[in-house]
Image (tube, grey):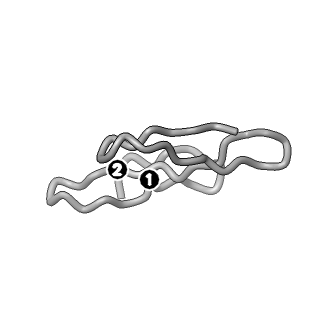
Amino acid sequence: MMLIKKRSDGKFKCVEGTDTGEAYVVLCGQTASGDIVPVLVDADGKLVLSS
């Protein structure tokens, strides 16, 4: 089990994992306007740096 401490209130949250033990997380970024959006990857799982 992996626990992540939240910055906002200091409470811990559990991170989901796969059956083989890898952590399962959604990576997000913040736009210049402040919106939080998921990071985009291509079919091979490589980061897409521009659209």
Q: Residue at x 39, y 43 (%)?
A: 6
Q: Residue at x 70, y 39 (%)?
A: 1
Q: Which residue is tagged 2? A: 29
Residue 35, picture quadrant? bottom left
Counting from the top left corner in percent of width and height, residue 22 is at 73, 39
Counting from the top left corner in percent of width and height, residue 12 is at 49, 43
Query: What count of labels does the image hold?
Result: 2
Task: Describe the element under mark 2 as helix, strand or loop.
Answer: strand
Image: 22 above or below 27: above
For residue 33, side relative to residue 47 (left or right): left
Dot 1 or dot 2: first in sequence order is 2
Counting from the top left corner in percent of width and height, residue 11 is at 43, 44
Most foreground residue, 13 or 16:
13
Residue, far left: 33
Image: 7 above or below 51: above
Task: Describe the element under mark 1 as helix, strand or loop.
Answer: loop
Locate the C terminus and report the quarter of the image it occupies: bottom left
Q: Amino acid at mark 1?
A: Val
Q: Residue at x 35, y 51 (%)?
A: 50
Q: Which residue is tagged 1? A: 39
